[in-house]
Image (cartoon, rainbow, N blue to C red):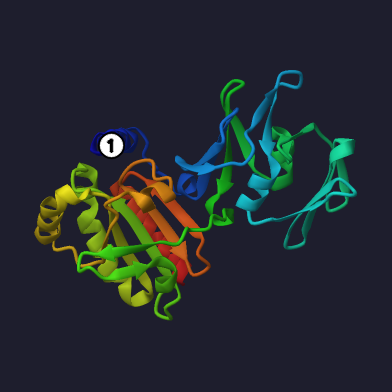
């Protein structure tokens, strides 16, 4: 396990050095990446599970993307009428109807033809149709294999999974119970490890963030992924840096695995609706500047 985590640390350091979000525009959009025949997709580098894998259609030279997964990601309700063989997606006043047997769809009653397939009971829809329906741009990353969509992060909906972990004092802390407190508006979950240099470098930023926002309803929670054999090292780090925000112990990597964490440091911002509204892998000073501006806008 230690070796696997060490490799994840190395890769996350590499990621942080190579990729830096330098503009506000890039930070307000997430890259949603689909890979052909893979039952996961990635949002900002973070993997999430799919119940139907994307396909590539050679005749039309297009990707076929799972419709329900994309719709639910963007907060659409999705219903299926088995008798009419029609799917309906709805958000606010926008209604999308997918007619499976006609290879067609409509947006607020305006019809279009498209290419679609049914796989494992799920509708897979042509990339350009996904782009039009959800008003997102796309780019082929690897021909016939990988495609990305640029999606505004404030439109993305991912439910944070509940968990209970012990803090360094041995007390149980539950995510949903903490979110239900009247004085809590947002929780920042930061997965970190003592053997991760970038994790240690960003601790002062989290201390400063916690001090500045704790009275505004924002709680920083560090989820330490060290094994029990590194307890002394963890204690030394907490004492050395004077960490004053809660540290929870994920010694068996249960929450790490539940959140499909792909390396540390890894940050998730969770709101009162239990939704992950922001995610970031790696650490840069510019990202903390952005995070502060994001929190200020959210709390305004």
Count the marks: how many? Answer: 1
**Residue 226 is at least partly visible in this image:** yes
Q: Residue furthest bottom?
A: 182
Q: Is residue 99 left or right of residue 141?
A: right
Choose between 185 and 25: the one closer to the eye.
Answer: 185
Name the residue rendered at 36%, 49% in the picture. Answer: 256
Left or right of 95 on screen, residue 61: left
x%, y% of residue 294? 43, 60
What residue is pinned by disc 1?
Answer: 13
Q: Position of residue 243 (x, y in %)?
A: 18, 63
Q: Residue at x 67, y 49 (%)?
A: 71
Q: Nearer the viewer, residue 29 or 1?
A: 1
Q: Is residue 292 visible?
A: no
Image coordinates of residue 224 in percent, x first then y, are: 26, 54
Residue at (25% x, 36% y) in the render: 6
Residue 147: % across, % down: 58, 31
Mark 1, Cα crowd under 10 Å, few <14 / some 14-19 / many 20+, is many
Q: Going by the image, does 140 lie left or right of 288?
A: right
- Assign the N terminus to one quadrant of the image: top left
Q: Is residue 47 above or below residue 146?
A: below
* Element on which disc 1 rests: helix
Q: Nearer the viewer, residue 255 or 15?
A: 255
Residue depicted at 41% across the width and 64% down the height? 295
Residue 39, quarter of picture:
top right
Query: Where, by quadrant of the figure, is residue 219 drawn?
Result: bottom left
120 up-or-down from 71: above or below: above
């Amino acid at each position: 396990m230690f070796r696997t985590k060490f490799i994840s640390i190395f890769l996350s350091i590499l990621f942080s050095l190579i990729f830096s979000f330098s503009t506000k525009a890039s930070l307000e959009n997430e890259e949603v990446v689909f890979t052909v025949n893979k039952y996961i997709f990635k949002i900002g580098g973070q993997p999430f599970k799919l119940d139907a894998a994307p396909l590539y259609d050679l005749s039309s030279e297009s990707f076929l993307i799972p419709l329900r997964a994309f719709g639910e990601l963007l907060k659409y309700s999705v219903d299926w009428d088995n008798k009419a063989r029609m799917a309906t997606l709805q958000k606010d006043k926008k209604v999308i109807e997918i007619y499976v047997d006609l290879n067609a769809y409509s947006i607020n009653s305006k019809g279009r033809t498209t290419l679609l397939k049914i796989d494992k009971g799920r509708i897979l829809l042509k990339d350009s149709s996904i782009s039009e329906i959800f008003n997102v741009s796309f780019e082929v990353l690897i021909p016939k294999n990988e495609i990305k969509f640029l999606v505004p992060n404030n439109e993305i909906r991912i439910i944070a999974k509940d968990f209970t972990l012990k803090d360094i004092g041995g007390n149980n802390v539950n995510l949903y119970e903490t979110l239900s407190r009247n004085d809590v508006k947002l929780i920042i979950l930061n997965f970190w490890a003592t053997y991760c240099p970038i994790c240690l470098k960003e601790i002062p930023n989290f201390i400063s963030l916690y001090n500045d926002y704790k009275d505004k309803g924002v709680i920083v929670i560090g989820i330490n992924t060290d094994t029990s054999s590194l307890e002394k090292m963890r204690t030394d780090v907490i004492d050395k840096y004077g960490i004053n925000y809660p540290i929870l112990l994920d010694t068996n990597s249960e929450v790490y695995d539940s959140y499909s964490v792909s390396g540390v440091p890894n940050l998730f911002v969770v709101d009162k609706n239990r939704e992950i509204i922001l995610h970031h892998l790696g650490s840069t000073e510019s990202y903390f500047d952005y995070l502060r501006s994001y929190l200020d806008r959210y709390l305004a």
